[in-house]
Amino acid sequence: EAQVTQNPRYLITVTGKKLTVTCSQNMNHEYMSWYRQDPGLGLRQIYYSMNVEVTDKGDVPEGYKVSRKEKRNFPLILESPSPNQTSLYFCASSLNPAVYGYTFGSGTRLTVV
Amino acid sequence: KQEVTQIPAALSVPEGENLVLNCSFTDSAIYNLQWFRQDPGKGLTSLLLIQSSQREQTSGRLNASLDKSSGRSTLYIAASQPGDSATYLCAVKEETSGSRLTFGEGTQLTVNP
């Protein structure tokens, strides 16, 4: 089944403890993105990647890192999480977003206390 | 800066009713518009993708239209069912936004039995 898989689905952590949210797609898509969703602010792009070893900042990149060492994986790294990073996170992938649209993962609910 | 607005924010209808959800965007320089469904605690499921050159797309009981020049899209749901209850999001892929989708805040639909 074609899909974007995120792990974990739920995570509660403490301020300052480094964490990684994994994202993997099995569709051989070039483009991958991370979004966060917050009440009243909607979905905002954090980082994106157009190919292996090519990443760039989205609208809200502060406090996050990403890497794209393989085409299928695009992990989101929070090196020192803070409570304002409590949010619902989505990974998405596309062969070409100008033509095919995006497929989204099931989301990761992160709480930083 | 692109802004996407969805009206109404919430809608409650009796089962069997036909309904229309609205999406408007401020910059008509888009490649496409995508409608998603989001169930509580779950990911985004793509419903329909309309390219900028298209006027409408249909899938089952769903029909999405696009008027690019006026910056409007509608999602028509025929013969609504309780299982259609969810939040519906529209998102545009701009011509000049890298890989980013710009989302509306969604319409929360409740279909009552």
Image (cartoon, coloured by chain):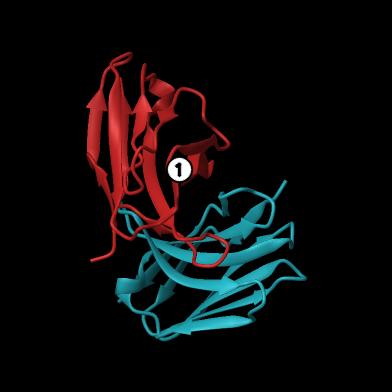
Chain colours: A red, B cyan
**Pick the front one: A99 or B6:** A99
* A52 shown above or below A13: below
Please identify the quadrant where the C terminus of chain B is shown: bottom left
Q: Quadrant of residue B85?
A: bottom left
Q: Secondary structure at mark 1?
A: strand
Q: Is residue A81 above or below residue B17?
A: above
**Residue receiving disc 1:** A35
Q: Name the residue nearer the viewer: B102 or B10.
A: B102
Instruction: Estimate the x, y position of residue A44 in percent, counting from the top left.
Output: 52, 42
For this view, does B30 lie left or right of residue B48?
Answer: right
Decide if residue A35 is in sight here.
Answer: yes
Q: Position of residue A47 (x, y in %)?
A: 49, 37
Viewer can see residue B18: no
Q: Tag 1: residue type? A: Tyr
Q: B11 or B95: nearer the eye? A: B95
Badge 1 local density, few (<14 within 10 Å), some, or many (20+)? many
Q: Position of residue A1 (x, y in %)?
A: 23, 66
User: Nearest the camera: B94 or A9?
Assistant: B94
Q: Tell me which corner region of the image, top left, top right, bottom left or bottom right, holds residue B81.
A: bottom left
Q: Most extreme residue toward the right, as rendered?
A: B69
Name the residue rendered at 44%, 24% in the picture: A84
Where residue A62 sits: x, y (%)?
A: 51, 24
User: Residue visible at 23% across and 42% down?
Assistant: A9
Chain letter of the residue beneath label 1 in the structure image: A
Q: Quadrant of residue B79?
A: bottom left
- Relative to B3, say whether B37 is above or below: below
Lateral position of residue A104 relative to residue A21, left or right: right
Q: What's the residue at 60%, 59% (across, down)?
A: B92
